[in-house]
Amino acid sequence: MASRRKTFIQTNPGGTSKGRKGKEPSDLGIANGSGGETHQIAPDSDCLTTQQGIPVADDQNSLKAGPRGPTVLEDFHFREKIFHFDHERIPERVVHARGYGARGFFELTESLAAITRADIFQRVGEKTEAFVRFSTVAGSKGSFDLARDVRGFAVKLYTNEGNWDVVGNNIPVFFIQDAIKFPDIVHAVKPAPDRAFPQAQSAHDNFWDFISLTPESMHMIMWTMSDRAIPRSFRFMEGFGVHTFRLLDANDRSTFVKFHWKPKLGLQSVMWNEAVKINGADPDFHRRDLWNAISMGAFPEWELGLQLFDQQFADSFEFDILDPTKLIPEETIPVRVVGRLVLNELVDNFFAETEQVAFCTQNVPPGIDFSNDPLLQGRNFSYLDTQIKRLGGPNFTHIPVNAQRCPVAHFQQDGHMAIQNPKGRANYEPNSWGSEGGPREHPSRGFRSHATESEGAKMRLRPESFSDHYSQARLFYRSQTPVEQKHITDALVFELSRCERADIRGRMTSHLAVIDETLATMVAGGLGIQVPEPVEPAKVPIDLPTSDALSIIVRGPKRFEGRKLGIYLSDGADPKLYKAALTAVKKAAAAHEVVAPKIAGATLSDGTVVEAHYKIDGGPSVLFDAIIILTSKESVKQLARDAPSQDFVRDAFLHCKFIAYSPEAMPLIEKAGIADELDEGCVEVIKAGDVGSFLEKCGELRIWAREGDVDLDG
Ligand code: HDE
């Protein structure tokens, strides 16, 4: 788009910026300070200007007193340019600093009119504009994507009755029960204040010190040590609202609700060894994945699911529904799908949208309300406070990504960067200016809080109903397949082995002994210590029926859709097999990328030149979900001696991926050291049909049986 070269792309505050799909910048206006006329960016503005619109004649040299003299103060263009540059940064988010956003829409598929008066849930088929930002929690803005961490899953829905923000995570529970502990957990996981490392990691003393002194975090720890914390892509993650919220109907009758986002392409994670390598090969792996998927029209999609329940269920449930360290198993209350969220537009400008988007848990429209979850109550204070600091004042709702799409009418005014300004004389209420006196409150349409009863002495106390910290940790661990349980063990051993203090390792293991004896034994074995005495729990855990919904592998998608095949091509490769790979990828609604010894590509045996996406050194197999190696007798001689080529094959094997290869590739496979171990996931392809059936097999995603022959943790 030629217009993307232009310096200014200002969007209409309060309106939708259609960027990539819609309006050209020259169509877009911006309200001026007095809130009336619009100021257009000249359609023919190829001429560089200052911020004031003064055409610039020379942008290469500052104005000097003599050719070798000092720069003069008069050079307003130079001063403006440097001053603006000096002020380009705003504070990064104190948590969730690294993130990536996209636009899309929510579509209602089932009316909830009987349960809530929220406008967004009334009319089936109606679409509501959305903005979503995914993030990691611990790392700074420039950290890598594949940290072992919780992922933020924040959704802004621009409803007809105001913005609704579902500010969730990809894990349905949290580390702590009370917001007052949030600064502590965050300080503990972030780089230590004296040395300023480690970055984007929980594998260090401070984190495990805090965790091992905080039994309420045990359930969440099982999740963060599981593969949930190293997702393959944002597209293959679930999202959760975490807290219990309320839906209120027209008569203010309340139904409790927990929000879920279910990925259409199924859940998938990477292996830890893979994550470590991806961070080196492509620190932007997740954001690139989202960008590429949307660019190629493979729009990521999630279902919105609700767990709905009443007070009677809440009273009978084993755990307190206000406790954010607990989930309600899907087998107990099934998730009811009521809509879908589709991300179909890239942002025009990362800073304008992804960096400035301001989510607030308190943004809920009429018909949705809070519960007394003490974490949620604390969050409702925190987000607004954060936005004022980050975005510099009270008018951040004037920034297009944060602006409501429905009409707003109020008497709030002035402040830094006021853009949407009230007209007329009355800026207070009540007033007697009649119809010119501005908006009036509306008891029936307006937001009403649920009339929750509250009583008791004012006190600082954790309720007894929040005291079981181990039962659901055990539930999560025991609901995993053996492969997933091993990954949890490996992660704990890895993380605790990075702790310098033996007492922290021991203390943590004694919590594991309460969760599950086998887990504690395996972790202690991996650390080379005896299983310590279990800690004495505040409440003795109970055994709960396991839940398949908690396992990624049990609910694997069994299809390759949305995944990526890496095709390693070298000179002289068979064009039939290459074409068959492309056809199979298309049929599976998957993607592919070509890796070759040289970036200019490979010349197939029929003379066709196929350009490469990566030179082998920059395209390791960790970037792909499955690989195919198509080579020739001649070119394989070089590949077999090349370390990145050997790694390509060996890593794919060790990461349990499906591997296809033409017979000529055997010398490379031998040099990679896996020739004696080839299994049903390693497929020789001779004719086009072999490639098709290989890709069908890839739907299994991984050959887990391959893992774990050698295990130093036992
Ligand atoms: Fe947040 N959290 N949080 N959080 N959170 C922020 O707000 C906070 C919590 C979550 O993409 C901050 O704008 C407190 C749970 C997401 O922009 C801040 C507590 C969950 C994002 C803040 C929590 C979340 C944030 C930092 C404990 C999952 C990124 C920057 C009471 C349900 C949103 C900002 C985005 C961001 C406070 C706990 C999710 C400081 C005090 C639980 C996805 O306001």
Image (tube, rainbow, N blue to C red):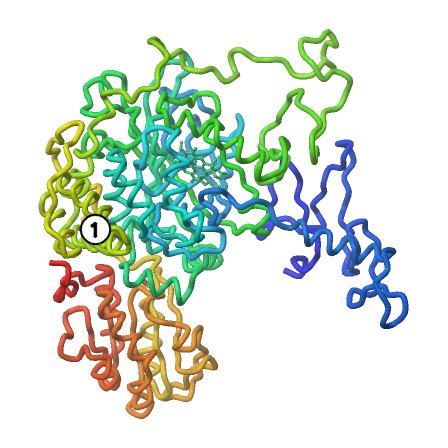
Q: At 13% from the left edge and 53% from the top edge, which residue is drawn?
A: 529
Percent position of residue 685, x then y:
23, 78
User: On screen, 601 above or below 693?
Assistant: below
Determine the secondary structure under disc 1.
Answer: helix
Residue 297: x %, y % from top left: 46, 56
Residue toward you, 618 or 505: 505
**Label 1 neighbour load within 10 Å: few <14, some 14-19, many 20+:** many
Residue lying at the far top of the rendered structure: 432
Q: Is residue 237 above or below residue 59?
A: above
Which residue is identified by label 1?
488
Residue 305: x and y in percent read 32, 35
Q: Quadrant of residue 586?
A: bottom left
Q: Nearer the viewer, residue 231 or 143?
A: 143
Label 1 CB, ligand 1: below 8 Å?
A: no
Circle 1: residue type: Ile
> On the rendered image, what quadrant is the N terminus found in?
bottom right
Q: Can you tell which quarter of the image residue 545 is in? A: top left
The image shows a total of numbered marks equal to: 1
Q: Is residue 690 left or right of residue 352?
A: left
Q: Residue at x 10, y 47 (%)?
A: 531
- Quadrant assignment for the C terminus: bottom left
Outermost residue on the right side: it is: 66
Indicate the quadrant of ligand 1 in the picture.
top left
Residue at 22% of width from left, 34% of height from top? 330
Q: As drawn, which residue projects farthest toward the bottom?
A: 634
Q: In the picture shown, does residue 457 fall above or below 200? A: above
Residue 540 on image: x %, y %: 12, 29
- Asked where in the image residue 152 lies, by quadrant, the reply is top left
Apparent side of residue 92 relative to residue 147 in the rendered image (left or right) = right
